Image: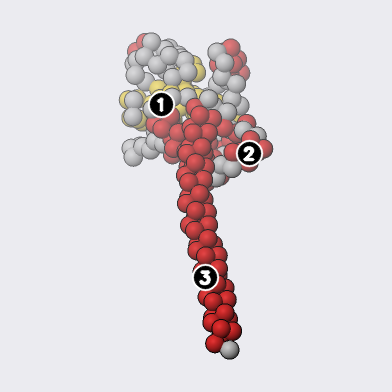
């Protein structure tokens, strides 16, 4: 009888020990899984940043296939943050940023990022204000047929859409079209105006009299 009780006791000890070993393995597995998950998340974020910056710098962010993004398991928010930062940084440096392929450029994210990269606190050129002092000096406006100017820009490789903004400014992609002294601001230069960031597409007789003057293309 004593032997039987002892045998039973040993049996239960073995069961308890086995259970503890299993529990330890489960706990260890959980820890390892958590570490692995954290490492995987870090790899995903690094990949996301790398992919986002690389793609933005080559100007083809909007052309990245969804399958490629899914294949890399890149977090959308991480890519978007890097994308916005890179666009804003480029715009702030007065470098050209191509427009998005959206039908309505004025409502596109790229346009908002570009134009939000710069702000002006002084007087703003308008139909009622024929001239103002803007960030580069004197600003005026003109309203002419821009088809020849657009053709010239196309020949230089600027393929962004020509359109008219809601305030009447004539646009090439993300930028207001302006005329300037081409010796000071060559065609394709990105310049600041009271109405936002602009691209130099044209020149005029005013340029010889005032080399810093900016003439804004409008439909006024």
Where residue 36 appears, as percent x and y from the top left, is 50, 49
Which residue is denoted by mark 1 in the rendering?
A: 94
Q: Residue at x 53, y 60 (%)?
A: 25
Q: In this rendered view, identify the residue nearer to me: 206 or 66.
A: 66
**Cα separation between marks 2 and 1:** 35 Å
Depicted 136 relative to depicted 211: above or below = below
Depicted 52 relative to depicted 186: above or below = below
Q: In this rendered view, identify the residue nearer to me: 59 or 183.
A: 59
**Cα separation between marks 1 and 3:** 70 Å
Are discs 1 and 3 less than 8 Å apart at CB?
Answer: no
Instruction: Mark yes or no: residue 115 visible.
Output: no
Are discs 2 and 1 less than 8 Å apart at CB?
Answer: no
Q: Secondary structure at mark 1?
A: loop
**Cα separation between marks 3 and 2:** 44 Å
Quadrant housing residue 67: top right
Where residue 197 appears, as percent x and y from the top left, is 44, 30
Neighbor class of circle 3 (other Cα within 10 Å; few <14, some 14-19, many 20+) is few
What mark, if any, has residue 71 been given in the picture?
Answer: 2
What mark, if any, has residue 17 been given in the picture?
Answer: 3
């Amino acid at each position: 009888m004593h032997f039987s009780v002892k045998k039973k006791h040993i049996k239960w000890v073995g069961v308890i020990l086995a259970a503890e070993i299993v529990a330890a393995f489960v706990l260890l597995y959980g820890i390892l899984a958590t570490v692995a998950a954290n490492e995987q998340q870090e790899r995903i974020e690094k990949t996301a940043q790398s992919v986002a910056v690389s793609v933005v710098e080559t100007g083809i962010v909007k052309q990245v296939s969804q399958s490629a993004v899914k294949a890399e398991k890149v977090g959308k928010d991480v890519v978007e943050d890097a994308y916005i930062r890179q666009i804003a940084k480029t715009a702030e440096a007065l470098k050209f940023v191509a427009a998005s392929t959206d039908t309505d450029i004025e409502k596109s994210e790229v346009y908002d990022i570009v134009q939000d990269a710069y702000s002006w606190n002084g007087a703003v050129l308008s139909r009622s204000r024929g001239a103002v002092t803007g960030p580069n000096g004197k600003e005026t406006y003109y309203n002419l047929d821009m088809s020849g100017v657009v053709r010239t820009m196309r020949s230089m490789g600027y393929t962004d859409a020509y359109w008219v903004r809601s305030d009447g400014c004539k646009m090439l992609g993300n930028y207001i079209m302006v005329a300037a002294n081409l010796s000071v601001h060559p065609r394709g230069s990105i310049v600041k105006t009271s109405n936002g960031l602009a691209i130099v597409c044209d020149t005029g007789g005013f340029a010889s009299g005032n080399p810093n003057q900016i003439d804004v293309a409008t439909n006024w």
